[in-house]
Image (cartoon, helix red, strand yellow):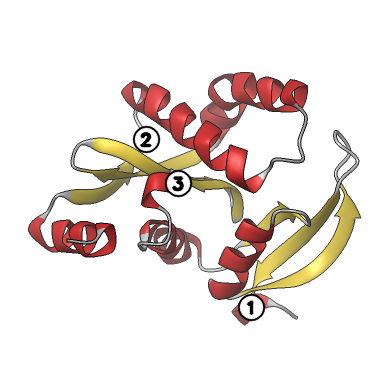
Amino acid sequence: MSVVRSIRSNLVKGGCVIRKYQERDLGELLETWAAASAIAHPFLSDEFLASERENIPNLYLPNAETWVFEADGNVVGFIALIGNEVGAIFVHPDHQRNGVGSQLMNKAKDLRGELEVEVFAENSVGRAFYTKSGFGLIEEKVHDQTGFPLHRLRLASFVG
């Protein structure tokens, strides 16, 4: 059975769930972030990524409403919301392209309606996902910490 069918089948059977982040999820959340970042952000320096890894539990998670996607008892994806901002959405590469990211984004849409997100211009995986999810470009700028171009996107139904 394909991974897609397996996860979709588990959703029906109850083997997958989207739930609020708990402290015990930190290890799997960081593993998911690191694996997905390696694919989405190969252009970022090791020093910047190490700093971000420290910031996740110490700065970002305490200030965000974070939801995890759990499949068969393992955290394989997460989305962090700060107000109507998607601060982060990551899916472990072993579980990408099977609906996990879309389900997490739909959870955020249900919770907030209007959403915005920033994505590195060089992150073609992320940009394609956000386009598929209905986001449109509202601003281009430079990321202060890295100097890389950044796109600010808004859910298309709210683009003015």
Image mark for residue 21: 2
Query: How would you rate the neighbour count of disc 3 (Cα within 10 Å): few for under 14, some for 14-19, many for 20 or more?
Result: some
Q: Residue at coordinates 52% horizontally, 30% vertically from top-left?
A: 61
Check disc 2 and give the amino acid type: Tyr
Q: Residue at coordinates 87% horizontally, 61% vertically from top-left?
A: 140
Residue occupied by mark 3: 93
Closer to us: 57 or 150: 150
Closer to us: 17 or 113: 17
Residue 46 position, x and y percent, is 73, 24
Check disc 1 and give the amino acid type: Ala
Residue occupied by mark 1: 156
Numbered-mark total: 3
| Residue 54, placed above or below residue 101 | above
- Earlier in the chain: of badge 3 and badge 2, it is 2
- Dot 1 and dot 3 residues touching (CB under 8 Å): no
Q: Which residue extends farthest left?
A: 13
* SS at circle 2: loop
* SS at circle 1: helix
| Residue 155, placed above or below residue 87 | below
- Please indicate whether residue 16 sits to the left or right of residue 104 in the image: left
Q: Residue at coordinates 91% horizontally, 41% vertically from top-left?
A: 147
- Earlier in the chain: of badge 1 and badge 2, it is 2
- Dot 1 and dot 2 residues touching (CB under 8 Å): no
Check disc 3 and give the amino acid type: Pro
Residue 9 position, x and y percent, is 15, 62
Q: Dividing the image into 4 quarters, which one contains the N terminus? A: bottom left
Query: How would you rate the neighbour count of disc 1 (Cα within 10 Å): few for under 14, some for 14-19, many for 20 or more?
Result: some
Query: How would you rate the neighbour count of disc 2 (Cα within 10 Å): few for under 14, some for 14-19, many for 20 or more?
Result: some
Residue 89 position, x and y percent, is 53, 48
- Earlier in the chain: of badge 1 and badge 3, it is 3
